[in-house]
Image (cartoon, rainbow, N blue to C red):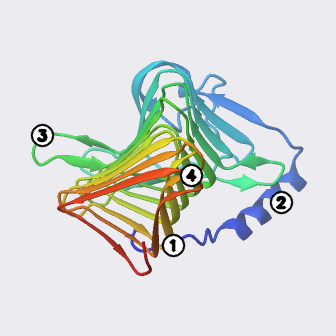
Amino acid sequence: MNGFDFSFKPFAVAAAVVWGLMAASPLRAANDVWKTAASGTWGAGGSWVDGSPPSSIFDQATFDKAGAYTVSFNADPDPIGALTLTSATNVTFASSSRPGNPILPRSLRLIEASGVSTGDLRISGGATLTLGAVTGGFPSTSHPFHLTADSNLHINPGATLNVRFGSDVVTLILSSDGLINVSGSGSTLNAHTTQVGDGSLNVTAGGLVQSSNSIVGLAGTGTATVSGAGSQWNNLGRLTVGFDEGASGTLNVTGGGSVSSADGVIGVINGTGTATVTGGAWTMTGQL
């Protein structure tokens, strides 16, 4: 995913689809729960407690089984209304294909529709979601995954989001009090607004984060680190480090990493902030 794209063009089409569905059938909401703490395929009915995968914007997918396992996607799933991970869940989403065939990136979209679905991704309770996997020895094969959350991406305290192996995430508002790792060339996180509160954002090994406006340390203690050649955090607007009373923000740019923004602000509304640039760069079109 190259360049900035925060237009969320499918909204109008999604709205039309929603009203068509509502006219055709009564409103119903389903919480589809992953059946066991074992790897499986998203589209297989046996992977889910109720015997069928989430298949509409009326459905929410929930992963609440403690343990580490992989959810494979051999086709693009139907858009759904929300995705939630809780407990000590450690889930990897990865594209798959038959042996000998190329690995095609698969995409899941969470749609926001007024009165119907939130379009949110929420990770809480110490859960971890990893997008992308790798198999084989050398050369290895990447299995990237694309996720779009029309509304908000919430990462609560103790939770983790990993974006790896060429995977990407697109969302309107990223709000994190947990841990986000964007690692590897082609791995991208696009958020119109990025808010790192009591959490950490790490962009490493050529990862890319693109935002419109961002805050590190929003009413809490937040840290952002951009490290390694080719690692970038690009902001179309303002990047603020330390926002609000008692808040503390830290920005580290090291080892060839780069950060860009229109303006930069360190410490505002009685917040405190620190920016350390060592072997990297923070460039601004405006002023600090």
Outermost residue toward the left in this view: 138
Residue drawn at (44%, 49%), measured in percent from left and top?
A: 249
The label nearer to you, 2 versus 4, is 4
Q: Which is more N-terminal, label 4 or label 2?
A: 2
Identify the residue position indicated by label 3 in the image.
137
Residue receiving disc 1: 237
Describe the element under mark 3 as helix, strand or loop: loop
Q: Are marks 2 and 4 in contact (CB under 8 Å)?
A: no
- The span from disc 2 to disc 3 (Cα, nearest Å) is 48 Å
Q: CA distance from mark 2 to mark 1?
A: 38 Å
Kind of residue at disc 3: Gly
Mark nearer the N terminus (1 vs 4): 1
Between discs 2 and 1, the one toward the N terminus? 2
Name the disc covering residue 270, or none.
Answer: 4
Location of residue 247 in the rendering, given as x and y in whole percent from the top left corner: 53, 45
Q: Nearer the viewer, mark 1 or mark 4?
A: 4
Left or right of 245, for residue 133:
left
Q: Is residue 178 visible?
A: yes
Q: Earlier in the sequence, mark 3 or mark 4?
A: 3
**How much space separates mark 2 and mark 4, taking CA atoms?**
50 Å
Secondary structure beneath label 1: loop
Measured from the top left, where is residue 128 in percent x and y? 44, 32
Q: Position of residue 54 (x, y in %)?
A: 64, 38
- Three-letter code for the amino acid on which mark 1 is drawn: Gly
User: Looking at the picture, does residue 142 appear above or below residue 280?
Assistant: above
Position of the N terminus, as image quadrant, is bottom left
